[in-house]
Image: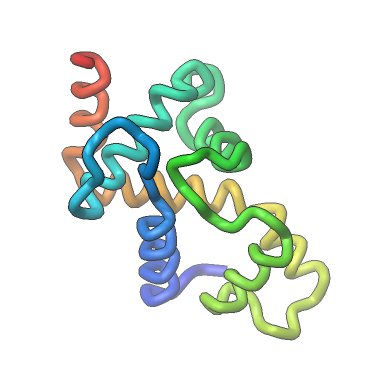
Amino acid sequence: MRLTTKQNQQYNTYLLDSINFEGFDFAAPTNNKEKIIQFFEVFNLEVGYNIKRLGEYKALSEYLQGLPSCINIVFNNYDILELAKEYGSISNNATDQQKQKILDNYWDFMANKLIKLKNKYSDLAGFIEYRLSNA
């Protein structure tokens, strides 16, 4: 199923609102671009080895499944399905097969959305690499 513009915005807002750096030793981001920069910096610092091994997309999907402290997205099946219903990805009377498809694709879907958010800010990828190499 292809997402509508509204659904894309809902998931983007959900992810951005879920990024939280409480307990980290740096200033809180003041806008969404800073949130994404800091999120991907933490991701790169924590699992850079896995990025080299699997590629960014799969490494990010695995990272999210490990419930990292810098993003608080739903992780249990019931809440994942409720989120999908709330944003119209599945109906309230979805079949078991439709529900399972949502569950099977959830982590990859969220990883993809985060990478698309990163790419939305065209200068971000190079900037993150620059900041990491000069840390």
In this view, the residue in front, 124 or 35, is 35
Position of residue 3 in the picture relative to residue 29 (left or right): right
| Residue 40 at x, y percent in the picture | 35, 35
| Residue 22 at x, y percent in the picture | 38, 44
The residue located at (44%, 53%) in the rendering is: 113
| Residue 3 at x, y percent in the picture | 48, 70
Q: Is residue 128 above or below residue 75?
A: above
Determine the image quadrant of residue 37.
Answer: top left
Q: Quadrant of the N terminus?
A: bottom right
Q: Is residue 132 above or below residue 60?
A: above
The residue located at (64%, 72%) in the rendering is: 82
Determine the image quadrant of residue 100.
Answer: bottom right
| Residue 77 at x, y percent in the picture | 73, 60
The residue located at (24%, 15%) in the rendering is: 133
In this view, the residue in front, 82 or 94, is 82
The residue located at (44%, 20%) in the rendering is: 48
Q: Quadrant of the C terminus?
A: top left
Q: How many callouts does the rendering have?
A: 0
Specify the farthest residue to the right: 96
Specify how the rendered protein is coloured: rainbow
Q: Is residue 112 above or below residue 9?
A: above
